[in-house]
Image: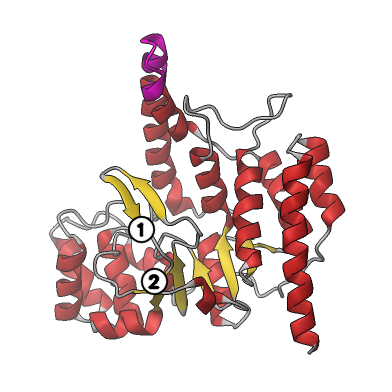
Amino acid sequence: MGLHIGDIVPRKEISFADLKGKVIAVDAFNVIFQFLSSIRQPDGTPLMDSKGRVTSHLSGLFYRNLALLKEGIRLIYVFDGAYHPLKSKTHALRQEAKDKAREAHATAVADGDFLEAGKYARQLSSVSEQMLDECKQLLRAMGIAVYQAPGEGEMQCAELVKRGDAWAVASQDYDAIAVGGSRLLQNLTLAKTRKTASGVVYIAPELITYVDTLQTLELDSDQLICLAILVGTDFNPGGVRGIGPKKALSLVREKKYPVAIFEELVAQGKCDFDWSEIFTIFKQPHVSKEPVVWPKYDRKKILALLVEEHEFSTERVGKQLDELEAVMREQKQKTLF
């Protein structure tokens, strides 16, 4: 669900040339779930091998990351650890939405409306432990670092940026900015368009920085966290009733201090959650200090997982790997020179 502050944060469009040689930290779960939801047949059926095992996640990870690696971008995929108890309401809302989609899907199938059934089938995706394990195997074989967070993956991504192990966080959410991540990248894909509810829209990589966000909104770090809590986070979905981003910004600027911002809302019964506990989650995120371990590229392991195990096209995968290796040789030569 994330923070709904996209309308008020400053951003600028950048090119992939600007990212060459940069290390980007990626919130793994969100990306994998996106691939499972979007890479499907017209009737909503995910890609599968002959044994009925879903392969949409592997296809998405392989081809998307190949394109980024060819652009000279290095990647760290960060995996979630244990969920914070306060996220239980968010998970309940997601499950409720999935249950409704399941009912609508069954109705569409019964009516023979397979186009409508496909739309709802995309909302029924789930990520299993086996899928996560396969994703980690593939990423490591591609030379992409895999990092295990003790808690929230996106907050760990922000930590990697703050300590200099990564240049930016890649995410469509804004948690990394609220927690103090220096740079947030959105639309990290070579696709030029994206389908939305209102139609197809043009997209390009966009950069949001922590410093520009604070300066433009005229807030300090604590006030930005308060703004996030007011509009709603995964720890308090929906935020404070009746307060959107612009109203929240005005309130934070007026009251200035966290206690002053929330005390009147609590007294009025509008704030029905412990704002201070959520404030602490963002102020002191549960993150790991372990170093990043960079694995070695391994063509044989990639082919074993994709071609031998899951029946991907030998010719197509091999051609893509040949192109990647050519780029890697060129980069190595330039480094040696």
Query: As shown in the figure, which amino acid type bears the numbered disc 2?
Result: Ala
The answer to whether residue 191 is magenta is no
Q: Secondary structure at mark 2?
A: helix
Where's residue 328, x and y in %?
A: 75, 70
Q: Is the magenta region chiefly helix, strand or loop?
A: helix
Where's residue 107, x and y in %?
A: 36, 15
| x 49%, y 63%: residue | 188
219 in relation to 103, above or below: below
Mark 1 sits on what residue?
233
- Marks 1 and 2, how far apart in space? 10 Å
Q: Spot the residue most to the right.
A: 300
| x 37%, y 34%: residue | 97
- Magenta residues, start to end: 105-116
Q: Is residue 279 visible?
A: yes
Mark 2 sits on what residue?
178
Crowding around mark 2 (Cα neighbors within 10 Å: few <14, some 14 to 19, many 20+) is many
Where's residue 14, x and y in %?
A: 43, 74
- In which image quadrant can residue 292 be found? bottom right
Say whether marks 1 and 2 touch (CB < 8 Å): yes
